[in-house]
């Protein structure tokens, strides 16, 4: 997908690499489990992705329960889709609107900003993402 940006002189420049919410190249979210709307490991998006699976998050038990109550079962294995089911601590590309809904409900999982696609900003304000950023060295962060 071609991206357009302004350089320091204000001229339009293009890049074929998707960007994250920090304005740098989008990093991988997870290869195990393999995530992304396109199952590339990245939270890339395109016209077919009506849900905007652009937020890379480390899912929590609270979020998985919240999602299940809203009809999106991310825990049950689905071998026909090569999906083993998620467990707390897994990284997964979430629908931006579901993440925002979880944030309002107080159960938003931490966000990996470097792996969250810039299109998430069409739905979620950057400040909310920043406030909920994954901090691997934080004393309360779950251990891998």
Image (spheres, rainbow, N blue to C red):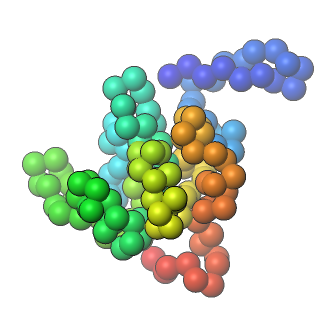
- Residue at image position (47%, 63%) is 105
Asked whether, in this view, residue 27 is left or right of residue 130, the answer is left
Residue 60 percent location from the top left of the image: 41, 70
Q: How many marks?
A: 0
Frontmost residue, 19 versus 101: 101
- Residue at image position (69%, 52%) is 127
Is residue 41 something one can see in this rendering? no
Asked whether, in this view, residue 141 is left or right of residue 98, the answer is right
Q: In the figure, 30 relative to 134: above or below?
A: above
Q: Residue furthest front?
A: 105
| Picture quadrant of residue 20 | top right
Q: In the figure, 39 relative to 2: above or below?
A: below
Q: Residue furthest top?
A: 11
Residue 62 percent location from the top left of the image: 39, 72
Asked whether, in this view, residue 66 is left or right of residue 22, the answer is left
Q: Residue furthest right?
A: 9
Residue 27 percent location from the top left of the image: 55, 47
Q: Which part of the image, by quadrant, shows the C terminus?
A: bottom left
- Residue at image position (23%, 54%) is 71
Q: Residue furthest bottom?
A: 139
Residue 107 percent location from the top left of the image: 46, 67
Frontmost residue, 125 versus 113: 125
Is residue 106 something one can see in this rendering? yes
- Residue at image position (38%, 44%) is 36
């Amino acid at each position: 997908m071609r991206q357009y940006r302004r350089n320091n002189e204000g001229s339009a420049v293009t890049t074929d690499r998707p960007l994250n919410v920090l304005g740098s190249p989008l990093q991988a979210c997870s290869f195990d489990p393999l995530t992304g709307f396109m199952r590339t490991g990245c939270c890339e998006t395109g016209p077919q992705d009506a849900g905007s699976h652009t937020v890379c998050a480390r899912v929590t038990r609270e979020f998985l329960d919240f999602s299940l109550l809203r009809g999106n079962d991310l825990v049950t294995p689905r071998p026909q889709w090569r999906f083993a089911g998620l467990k707390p601590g897994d990284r997964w590309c979430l629908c931006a609107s579901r993440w925002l809904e979880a944030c309002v409900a107080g159960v938003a999982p931490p966000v990996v900003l470097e792996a969250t696609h810039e299109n998430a900003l069409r739905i979620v304000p950057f400040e909310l993402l920043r406030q909920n950023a994954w901090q691997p060295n934080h004393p309360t962060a779950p251990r891998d």
